[in-house]
Image: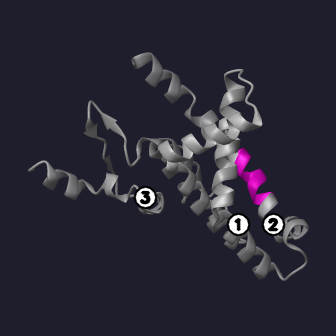
Amino acid sequence: MQANIKHISLNMDVTEQQWLNLMKEVLIRCDPKAVKQFFGDAPDLELRKKLRHFFADQVFVDMWAGYMVGMHATKVGKAVSSHELKEKSKIMLEVFPVPFHLMSSLLQKIAMDKEFKLDNPEKKRWNFVWDSQLSFSIGANHEIADVPIFFITSDGEIIKAAEAAGCGSRVLSLKDYLASVGF
């Protein structure tokens, strides 16, 4: 466990920078000039609204799940057929819905904010990569030894994503958690 913690801590900056680089590419693709090819010629605000609507749609969430399954399969050297990709994506969304809703929410914000700054040191947007990874632990049926798992946080975005994913009851504030254990 200590070796894993050391490995993760040594790679935190690299992981955060990789995420920022990936998201900078997303920002470029969210620009109204870029999305005209998909949504047609329209004023920038209308294009941004259409893009936000796309990111809020289940079609996007399904596509994102497929992308994640494919990316992870590649990392472990597994080929995935289109049928397997669809099935595994469905399982991923059923078991780990919260990170997909969290990403959807972030992309909706990016779509609507023409001044969105990923590398703003005051906002620490790169922290999203860790919020996203932690949110994999939130699920409607997640248990350890038949005991439900609860996620303790005051992070509004994680709470909203859990609610959108139907897992809101598995997220508690510290105050509510302490009360539930009689403290």
User: Tag 2: residue type?
Assistant: Asp
Query: Colour scheme of this structure image?
Result: one colour
Disc 2 secondary structure class: loop
Q: Is residue 170 visible?
A: yes
- Quote the CA–CA distance across marks 2 and 3: 31 Å
Image coords of residue 142 (percent x, y): 37, 40
Q: Nearest the camera: 47 or 114? A: 47
Residue that extends furthest to the top in the rendered view of this protein: 3
Q: In this figure, which residue is indicated by the disc labeled 3?
A: 166
* 79 to 171, vertically: above or below: above
Image coords of residue 73 (percent x, y): 68, 28
* Number of numbered discs visible in the structure rendering: 3
- Quote the CA–CA distance across marks 2 and 1: 14 Å
- Quote the CA–CA distance across marks 3 and 1: 20 Å
Q: Is residue 124 left or right of residue 179?
A: right
Is 154 in the magenta?
Answer: no
Mark number displayed over residue 43: none
Residue that extends furthest to the left in the rendered view of this protein: 182
Residue drawn at (70%, 66%) of the image: 54
Stretch in magenta: 21-28
Image coords of residue 120 (percent x, y): 62, 58
Image coords of residue 115 (percent x, y): 70, 70
Q: Earlier in the sequence, mark 2 or mark 1?
A: 2
* 23 to 32, vertically: above or below: above
Image depth: mark 2 or mark 3 in front: 3
Q: In this figure, which residue is indicated by the disc labeled 1?
A: 54
Mark number displayed over residue 31: 2
Instruction: Evaluate if marks 3 and 1 touch, with contact meaning CB atoms under 8 Å apart.
Output: no
